[in-house]
Amino acid sequence: MVLDSFIPRFVDMKIQRVYTVHIRYEQLEALMKIILSNNEKIPFYEQLEIQIRNNILDGRLKKESKLPSIRSFARELGISVVTVKRAYDNLESEGYIHTVGGKGSYVAGQGLARLKEKKIQLAEEQLQLVLNEMQKLGVTKQSLLLTISLLWEEGE
């Protein structure tokens, strides 16, 4: 009997890792859901960076919330310490977090104005993508402005 005949010829290499990490801060518990996917073309450090940034911008991670240590986060997510460190370093260089030697990394105490400006910038980037698509579809500026006006009034 040949064992090779029992080995599947095609192996599905699409593995997706989904993790939920609980972070405690000041007697409260914040839930930060982290989803790392091998199916994405984006490297793990970027996926992690994007999701932590979104948790900060959405207010799920509050000012001065302590982030998991690099080692424990890497262990919980099943990824390299270097991957988590790179994500943390990038977030720190962008001003989202700060690191205190020997104590860990914390959400930076950004002012509300800075957070609001960042959210507006992200919304403008999304709006630009929609506008580009509308132009490709041949929607006129006048028609688009009318649609925006109607949608704005519905939201009030």
Image (cartoon, grey):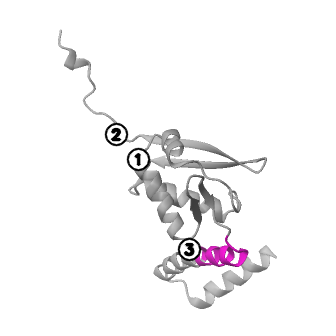
Q: Earlier in the sequence, mark 1 or mark 3?
A: 1
Q: Are marks 1 and 2 in contact (CB under 8 Å)?
A: yes
Along the line of sight, which residue is nearer the eye, 14 or 79?
79
Residue 100 is situated, as x and y percent measured from the top left of the image, at 58, 59
Residue lying farthest to the right in this orientation: 156
Q: Residue 86, position in %: x, y?
A: 44, 58
Q: Residues within 10 Å of mark 1 (few under 14, many from 20)?
A: few
Q: Left or right: where does residue 154 sit relative to residue 77?
A: right
SS at mark 1 in the image: loop
Q: Which residue is mark 1?
A: 38
Magenta highlight range? 110-123
**Residue found farthest to the left:** 2
Which residue is tagged 2? 13
Looking at the rendered structure, the kind of residue marked 2 is Met
Looking at the rendered structure, the kind of residue marked 1 is: Asn
State the mark number for residue 126: 3
CA gap between label 1 and label 3 equals 25 Å
